[in-house]
Image (tube, coloured by chain):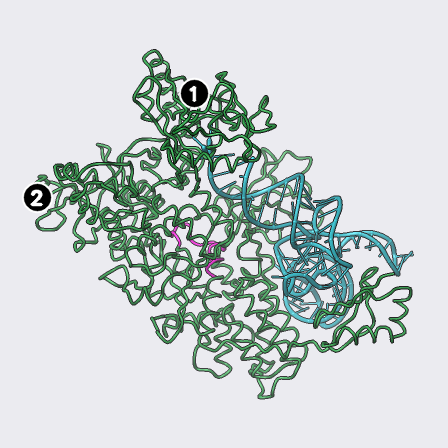
Chain colours: A green, B cyan
Amino acid sequence: MEYNFQQIEKKWQARWVENKTYKVAEDENKKKFYVLNMFPYPSGAGLHVGHPLGYIASDIYARAKRLQGYNVLNPMGYDAYGLPAEQYAIQTGQHPEVTTFANINRYREQLDKIGFCFDWDREVRTCAPGYYHWTQWAFQKMFNSFFCYKHQKAMPIEKLIEHFEKEGTGDWTNLACTETMSFTADEWNSWDDKKKSDVLMNYRIAFMGETMVNWCAGLGTVLANDEVVDGVSVRGGFPVEQKKMRQWCLRVSAYAQRLLDGLETIEWSDSIKETQKNWIGRSEGTEIEIKVADSDVDFTIFTTRADTMFGVTFFVLAPESELVDMVTTPDQRAAVDEYIKYVKGRTERERMIDHTVTGVFSGAYGINPITGDKCPIYIAEYVLAGYGTGAIMAVPAHDSRDYSFAKHFDLPIVPLIEGADVSEESYDAKEGIVTNSPAEGNPAVEYDGEALILNGKTIKEAIQATKEFVKKHNLGRVKVNYRLRDAIFSRQRYWGEPFPVYYKKGIPTMIPEECLPIELPQVDKFLPTETGEPPLGNATVWAWDEANKKIVENTKIDNETVFPIELYTMPGFAGSSAYYLRYMDPHNDKGLLSEQAAQYWQNVDLYVGGSEHATGHLIYSRFWNKFLFDLGVSVKEEPFQKLINQGMIQGRSNFVYRIKDTNTFVSLDKKDGYDVTPIHVDVNIVSADILDVEAFKAWRPEYATAEFILNDDGKYVCGWAVEKMSKSMFNVVNPDMIVEKFGADTLRLYEMFLGPVEQSKPWDTNGIDGCHRFLKKFWNFFIGKDDQLVATADAPSKEELKALHTLIKKVTGDIEQFSYNTSIAAFMICLNELTKIKSTSREVKETLVVLIAPFCPHLAEELWEMLGHDTTVCDAPWPAFNDDYLKEDSVKMMVAFNGKARFPLEFPADVTKEAAEAAALADPQSAKWMEGFQVNKVIVVPGKMINIVLKK
RNA sequence: GCGCUUGUGGUGAAAUUGGUAGACACGCCAGACUUAGGAUCUGGUACUUCACGGUGUGCAGGUUCGAGUCCUGUCAGGCGCACCA
């Protein structure tokens, strides 16, 4: 009987559905284990062989954990909101829901063929009202919360209102806010609702802000920072410009420190942690107040190099800074205005690429509080409004950007570090001894009889001394800055979660929690309205009747009882930020999840997905979870304990070479000498780089009459290149085809055998035979020539046990480390060994089936059944490992003096140094080796070797 | 510029974490069975040499009895951040 994978796989996939084999429920008697894949966006192109890589790896892990007795949660769902479906809708008028559902069905069909142990009863879709109910709910919670730095925690906004009513801002100065505010209780109480709402927006975690946003005209929406790369949108590659707009934002920056600290507690790769650290961009420095000479204006600068106060020769403001207007003198006004105009005309992209020095003198002077020196204030685009205070002190001697600016505008350069030569370039290094303080012409100013002198100190000491001086004399403060920006949370799009918000006389107001979810309204056009409003402006039923608590027609808006509803929708990351929590309790209509489910499943133990989400999803999720943790909804501060980043599977494209202006194609080895155009050819009609000429002719009508110049063997050899796997390169390999030809178990095995899961590599179907052959042999090991199962009651021999336990050890260890490729190699070796010694023992065979079950579940189930079990192999116990069977009983000896020579002696594994040395000397041949030498030392590596080190 | 990461046969890759480098697989070579093989099985396959031997983990040093593995420097590729003060 042959290994009939098609029949076996079909049979078991049906049984698993029928028996609900992979359904999980909370079980207090079992330890939980939560395995999760990043859920996919169901694109129209379907799955290619690269997509399941991570799913297979985590499936193996999940199955192994279940065999090891854990209650394993391994769910799957769809990130269903997204731009491609909407773009398609705009072009065709097809509702995005229709295309999205069709794509989901296609995905599901493909996934089912690979034999995953997902509990599909827990499937989530971000576009389902029952799901986005809780996305909207979380948004409202964020709206109704503020963040206190002192407690490092989100708190209910009512508390803040209460405080404002009693004491105004009072001593609550350490709150996350857009701008620092100060007012009394009387002031607060005198304000109207609109003013109060505006003030509270300054503190809410989900807030509406007038901010600089990345506006993408091509997509007609704003984008988050991680959705923009090199000044163009990630989706579509349209140019992105900076624009000031009213937008919903999430105060992610409030959690910057916790996001940073949390990284220390989780098992992620260093590179992802590092990427996130860079993105958060913590920098510890000093803020110093600078007074503008002959004016009552002052401003604050931020520096990490407080030690260089004596080298300040000018100040610089960002062109967008509000201070520009305040400091500019009348005679410089025209020049400044012109410069601002120039800067505004430049796109983000131009600014990023072009670093030529530009700037303008404001006419004003700032006073350095340490030296009392008056330094000119410039305005220049190299200072960014969004970082620090948007104002800097320039120390050209020790900062390369300040240096080139000073050279360009001929400003003085004052070096402060011993031995630093600044005639050609600045000395930026943070190493050296400070000198020249106070510098000539820059005397130190005394405060309470004390002046700051840094000479002789190291840079580190000088920074510390300056910080303390500044603090003591109230010249500024120590300050930590983060690069992490608040996330823009609204999109001018249709296919996303609607905001549960209406505008009550201009005040953004939450729709009552019990009325959620607010469902996405129907529209007949997916483009913005003629008046330029977002697509939701096309909805005719989109107004909030406050008294009756329901959505009504727009025509009823009177702004007395019926109000307009928000037209923006939420961004893609809204739905993907807490989906892992929803899987724990997906059908709950009372809450995001029950307390009981949260307590049981806690958080994700193993998360598998691509590293491209490092600064997007993986930051937003952590933020979102921390917020829910503060609320007591999530029980763990970090959502994903361990993270594995699977590599990308690239495509291996094939080329044919057409001689220009002909329909003749020349083989790779003969193409030199012809003027040829390489053309992508479908990899599915190429095998081992040899083109199927007939299939090529049939591939496209224009090639039907193609002629060929073949190589000497009469074959057409194609060229190849590694590229992204995509339809346009004709290099997409579809998993369905592999499954049909070799079976899902072979596909699973081969994808893992290809190399480490974390590594990116090109797909190459050629090696798959090896894995398929192994499974055939595996099958034949169980099923004899007469189609009968071969399994005897004989106790396994010593050799069988050794081979088997070597495998148990290897596989058990490898699964923890995701070294599946070496596990598979171990299976091959073990099977070879057992076949060679003609092992028949049932005990051995049963163990083997359990071990291979995570990798090849269909085959394992079939054999498990043939072995006489009527339960699923998924619940068999994982075999125990016994070290005794592996112990080597002898050990070889080697000489370590002059090369790799080995003694021709073997010893029991537990030999002592003394016994080994004595035996070596007693043996005539060994003694010959050692002639003329003395024994220096004897090294015993237990069970491995004995090493006699000689010396003259 | 700063940070992370990877360099091993014709190819994908192993190496029990400092102990005989190249497991396992693809490919290739030879043989067997075949009318046939893109089926199956057996053996071989780092480089160099007829051979004995010699050389080999990007390169150059170092530590060690012993280094792919640890240290220093250097080169090359990949990724992230970047006029971030």
In what quadrant of the picture does the C terminus of chain A appear? bottom right
Separation of disc 1 and disc 2 at Cα?
Answer: 62 Å
Q: Which of label 1 and label 2 is nearer to you?
A: 1
Q: Is residue A477 above or below residue B47?
A: above
As drawn, the label of residue A647 is none
Q: Residue furthest top?
A: A331
Q: Please, what secondary structure does the residue beneath circle 1 have? A: loop
Image quadrant assignment for residue A389: top left
Query: Is residue A934 found left or right of B72 in the rendered image?
Result: right
* Dominant secondary structure of the residues highlighted in magenta in the image: loop
Q: Is residue A45 magenta?
A: yes
Residue found at x 46% / y 47%: A612
The N terminus of chain A lies in quadrant = bottom right
Label 2 environment density (alpha carbons within 10 Å; few <14, some 14–19, many ≥20): few
Q: Which residue is mark 1?
A: A373
* Mark 1: amino acid: Asp
Q: Residue at x 34, y 68 (%)?
A: A600
Q: Amino acid at mark 2?
A: Thr
Q: Chain of mark 2?
A: A
Residue sitting nearer the eye, A679 or A73: A73
